[in-house]
Amino acid sequence: RTTDAASLRIAGLQGLGEIPSWDGSSAFTGGQVKAVDEYNTTGITLNYVQYGAQMTVSRADRFDVPETLGFASQKLGFAVANTYAKQAFTSLAGGFTGGTKTGDDVDLFHDNHTTAAGGSNYRVNMITSALDPSGLMAAIKAARAWTSFDGAPYDLVSAGFYLVVPVELEEAAHQAVRSVFTLTNATDTAGQGLNNVAGNYISPADIIVSPHFATTNDWCLISKIESPLVFWERLSPELRVTEDPDTLVTKITCDFAIAVGCHSEPSVAIGSKVS
């Protein structure tokens, strides 16, 4: 999202899970009318942070090492990408720890997301399963059971998921997806003959590992077609190369402004809080 504003307000679509019947001519009334607004008192507001850095190269170094400018620009580009990734995955990890909340003012991954019915009629998108074939299937089951705010089924499983894990769970992620059988250790003879079907839903290419997703044991599934996160690029990265007329130093400057937060709705993400 690249909205040009000082801050970005995220509105929720209040309870449109199914399309009601209509006679084709009457004015829309009652349950046929849904307001696009915040269905709570908190809402979501993103306030961007501006980033900037500068690298300098002396005139002598520029001539002695001709590739210096290109190498410095490459380093700046990597630093920009790394900063973008850090903000995104840190926000995602914050869904377990209270740093990232949805429009109902609870953590992104939680067991009491609100519904239109109110009271204790909560929606659950957090499990506590370790990352193995059975844990993946528990997450898939939770995704199947997810509903919209008004309680209608909101099953996006067929669209596929990304499996997001910390560095510590990279091996476990591939074992859970690629293992032919469901056994978890060499003595697990009871499950040895059962096929691992988790690979039907997630392929090795869908596994995303990031050192910025600092959760150690926690992991999550993110829908491929509806991410719970909003990444706001207020100012896109701009690289400038200038020369100081007094010192003849070449300056390579880059700046940008971004913000990351949740949609008002947590659809569709399933988190497993193990640690």
Image (tube, rainbow, N blue to C red):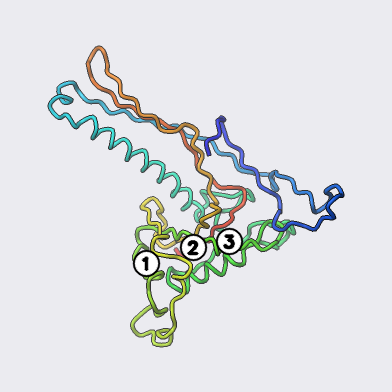
Answer left or right for 27 relative to 207.
right
Q: Which residue position holds label 2? A: 273
Mark 1 or 3: the one toward you: 3
Q: Identify the mark nearer the N-term, 3 or 2.
A: 3
The residue lying furthest to the bottom in this view is 190
Residue 1: where, in percent of width, then height?
53, 39
Residue 179 in the image: above or below residue 151: below
Residue 219, by quadrant, is bottom left
Residue 140 in the image: above or below residue 11: below
Residue 153, by quadrant, is bottom right
Query: Could you tell me which residue is drawn at 44 percent across and 80 percent down?
Result: 195
Mark 3 or 2: the one toward you: 3
**SS at circle 2:** loop
**SS at circle 3:** loop
**CA gap, disc 2 and disc 1:** 19 Å
Q: Identify the mark nearer the N-term, 1 or 3.
A: 3
**CA gap, disc 3 and disc 2:** 22 Å
Q: Which residue position holds label 1? A: 174
Q: Which residue position holds label 3? A: 156
**CA gap, disc 1 and disc 3:** 23 Å
Residue 212: where, in percent of width, then height?
39, 50
Residue 12: where, in percent of width, then height?
66, 47
**SS at circle 1:** helix
Query: Could you tell me which residue is drawn at 55 percent across and 51 percent down?
Result: 228
